[in-house]
Image (spheres, helix red, strand yellow):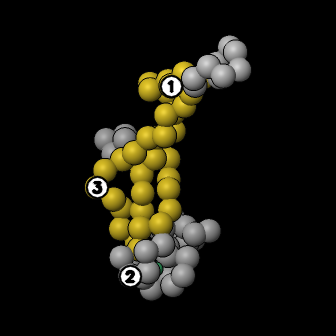
Amino acid sequence: MPKNENGTIECLNDKNHKMIKGESSYMVPSFKKPDNVGEPLLLEVTKGFAYDIHYCEECGYMELYDYKDEDE
Ligand SMILES: [Zn+2]
């Protein structure tokens, strides 16, 4: 869950609600642990987790899925 047996993403609150894929994709960048305590985190902007958002128009339920290139 909450993908149904046909692989369609369903709203967890009501399977009759329509889930919509957001127009943009997003990314949570990763960071490298600093060598010494107290030093700032080292942001690695080319690494991280890329995802798409699917949301329910009616109740606001939201899910994140791995980003997939639509051309693949
Ligand atoms: Zn819903």
Measured Cα–Cα span from mark 1 to mark 2: 36 Å
On residue 27, the disc is none
Q: Give the amino acid at mark 2.
A: Glu
Ligand 1 within 8 angstroms of badge 1 C-beta: no
Give residue 11's position: percent from left, percent from top.
49, 76
On residue 23, the disc is 3
Q: Earlier in the sequence, mark 3 or mark 1?
A: 3
SS category of the residue bearing label 3: strand
Q: Give the amino acid at mark 3.
A: Glu
Quadrant where the image shows the C terminus = top left
Q: For mark 2, does the 10 Å Cα neighbourhood hold few (<14), some (14 to 19), or many (20 or more) residues?
A: few
Q: On the image, which quarter does residue 3 sit in?
A: bottom right
- Residue drawn 41% across and 67% down? 55
- Residue drawn 57% across and 69% down? 2
Ligand 1 within 8 angstroms of badge 3 C-beta: no
Q: On the image, which quarter does residue 69 sit in?
A: top left
Measured Cα–Cα span from mark 3 to mark 1: 26 Å
SS category of the residue bearing label 1: strand
Q: Give the amino acid at mark 1.
A: Leu
Q: Earlier in the sequence, mark 1 or mark 2?
A: 1
